[in-house]
Image (cartoon, rainbow, N blue to C red):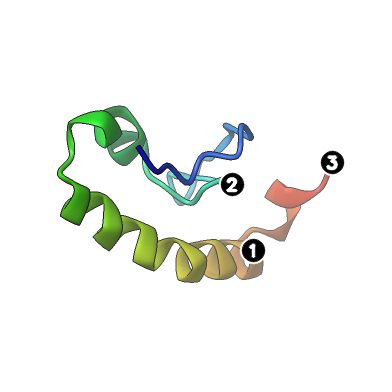
Amino acid sequence: MVTPCIKVCVVEPLSGLCIGCGRTLREIGGWASFSPDARDRIMAVLPDRLARLKQTAPDAFME
């Protein structure tokens, strides 16, 4: 099963998005039960989500 997980599991509290993959907690938790089409639709929006998150919450990405 394809997954966007990069093993950086930290949820930015204001957006509710994982800073590693860009998914919500609901998406992370339900990933295995989603259809391949649903996973593909989510995967398609993750790059834009992460780009917006990096702009709005850059401190979340600092080590």
Residue position for label 3:
63
Kind of residue at badge 2: Ile
Quarter-wise, where is residue 16 in the image?
Answer: top left
Where does the image place residue 29, in percent across and percent down from the top left?
Answer: 30, 28
Taking the image as shown, residue 10 lies to the left or right of residue 15, namely right
Kind of residue at badge 1: Lys
Quarter-wise, where is residue 55 in the image?
Answer: bottom right
* For the residues bearing labels 2 and 1, Cβ distance under 8 angstroms: no
Mark 2–mark 1 Cα distance, whole angstroms, equals 9 Å
Where does the image place residue 2, in percent across and percent down from the top left?
Answer: 39, 43
Q: Nearer the viewer, residue 11 or 34?
A: 34
Residue pictured at 54% horizontal, 70% vertical:
52
Which label sits on residue 34? none
Mark 2–mark 3 Cα distance, whole angstroms, equals 12 Å
Q: Earlier in the sequence, mark 2 or mark 1?
A: 2
Q: Nearer the viewer, residue 34 or 55?
A: 34
Q: Residues within 10 Å of mark 3 (few under 14, many from 20)?
A: few
Residue position for label 1:
54
Query: Residue lying farthest right?
Result: 63
Kind of residue at badge 3: Glu
Q: Secondary structure at mark 1?
A: helix
Where does the image place residue 27, in percent across and percent down from the top left?
Answer: 30, 40
Q: Nearer the viewer, residue 9 or 5?
A: 5
Asked if residue 25 is positioned above or below residue 16 in the image, the reply reads above
Residue position for label 2:
19
Mark 1–mark 3 Cα distance, whole angstroms, equals 13 Å
* For the residues bearing labels 2 and 3, Cβ distance under 8 angstroms: no
Residue pictured at 51% horizontal, 39% vertical:
5
Residue pictured at 59% horizontal, 44% vertical:
20
